[in-house]
Image (tube, grey):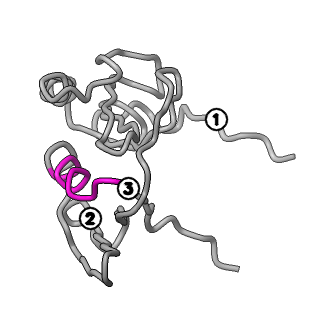
Amino acid sequence: MQTPRLTHIALHVEDIDACVQFYRQFCGMAIIHQRQHGPKKIIWMAEPSREADFIFVLMNGGQNLVLADNDYRHFGFALDSHAAVDDIAQRARQAGSLVWEPRQEPFPVGYYCGLRDPNGNYVEFSYGQPLGPGADDFSKLTPPKEA
């Protein structure tokens, strides 16, 4: 049996245009497909060169989320330096969307900050996690024991 592979996340958002602008501005994503059926608008966004790997699907007609400050569910994006995390945090601070100030945590978390997108989703920007630039030794991760 083939192992499933994550290909997309679909977000049902209230203000699709504001979300498109956020993911362009802070995540560098671009629209790769869009369509409209009556009032229903659907937009696919991807990081450059990852269009065939992983996408965000934005759909209008949703409701904004209200997440507690201590709710850490989020989308994670890797950056190439501490300075890049600080830059995103500064831009987000000016835009009023910074929710987690930059901080350093032990491996495997690294250096990160968090933003709130226009729909209320949290978005993390990190440096030094095992899945991105500046990664520490990935072999330090301990897989869970089989039950």
Q: Where's residue 64, x and y in %?
A: 41, 45
- Look at the image and give the residue range highlighted in magenta: 14-24
Instruction: Say left or right for 99 vs 73.
Output: left
Closer to the camera, 59 or 109? Answer: 59
Q: Work out whether 49 lies above or below 69.
A: below
* Residue 23 belongs to the span the image colors magenta: yes
- In the structure shown, which secondary structural element does the residue marked by tag 3 occupy? loop
Mark 3, residue position: 13
Give the SS element for disc 2: strand
Q: Tag 1's secondary structure?
A: loop
Amino acid type at image mark 2? Met
Disc 2 marks which residue? Answer: 45
- The percent position of residue 112, horizontal first and vertical second, equals 33, 25
Spatial CA span between label 3 and label 2: 14 Å
Q: Residues within 10 Å of mark 3 (few under 14, many from 20)?
A: many
Q: CA distance from mark 1 to mark 2?
A: 33 Å
